[in-house]
Image (spheres, rainbow, N blue to C red):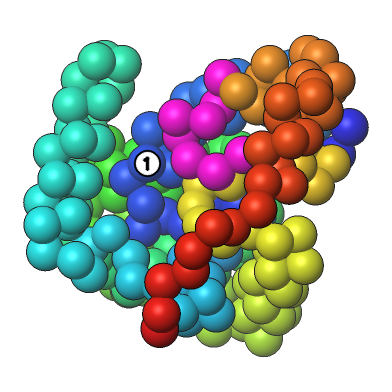
Amino acid sequence: MHIVWYFDFISPFAWLQWPKLKALAAAQPVTLRPIVFAGLLDHYGNKGPAEIPGKREFSYRHVLWRAQQAQQPLRFPPAHPFNPLAALRLCIAAGSNVAATDAIFDWIWAQGRAGDSAETLAPVAAQLGIADVASAIADVDVKAQLKANFEAALAEGVFGVPTLSLDGRLFWGEDAHEFALACLRDPTLWDEPEMRRVAALPIAVARRT
């Protein structure tokens, strides 16, 4: 089964799922694809949680509580939302592997450091063996790969982050991880009669836009 994880470092919920992804990646191959979450919002005409004042405050409190329940360190960076392009490109420049993803996530969400520029990411880049982080994140191939990752996400129908794709079956959000594992163990779960019925459920009313 082809397993892909789409994520953006801007998402604290992606950080919350990350330990589970590491465990999964240790057991079988997982492709890590950093993407620009804001691009998905633009594509679908949506607002992010942090763009809606009440939802922003609740989401921050909720993710902190979830991290506490999981006994996982979580410290917000100095400002949020922030521009994640530098972090995403650094991840790609470093190989988009577990080590690079882990180091950048830890820097931003465990240590609470800024990750929005070459300067703020210089220490973690050095840890990953990249001395000239500015050149690395400006590389045309790195930029092209980030764009290709985004196009792959759209092609699969990804609409949010984090999203785990199991052969194109999408599991959105950290709280869907156990559902994904259940379907990984038993792929027939996805196609049980009631699962298929709700997937084709008619729409009774549509909100005007």
Q: Does residue 60 appear left or right of residue 12 in this picture? A: left
The answer to whether residue 17 is visible is: no
Is residue 172 located in the magenta-colored stretch of the structure? yes
For the point 65% across and 27% down, which residue is it? 180
For the point 17% across and 56% down, which residue is it? 56
For the point 24% across and 36% down, which residue is it? 63
Q: Does residue 18 appear left or right of residue 94 in this picture? A: left
Residue 36 percent across, percent down from the top left: 51, 69
Res 66 quadrant in image? top left
Q: Which residue lies furthest to the front in this view?
A: 204
> Which residue is denoted by mark 1 in the rendering?
13
Q: Which of 133 and 44 is in front in this view?
A: 44
Residues drawn in magenta: 171-178
Check the image and report above or below for 73 versus 156.
above
Magenta stretch, overall SS: helix
Disc 1 marks a residue whose amino acid type is Phe
Check the image and report above or below for 19 versus 201.
above
Q: Residue furthest right?
A: 1
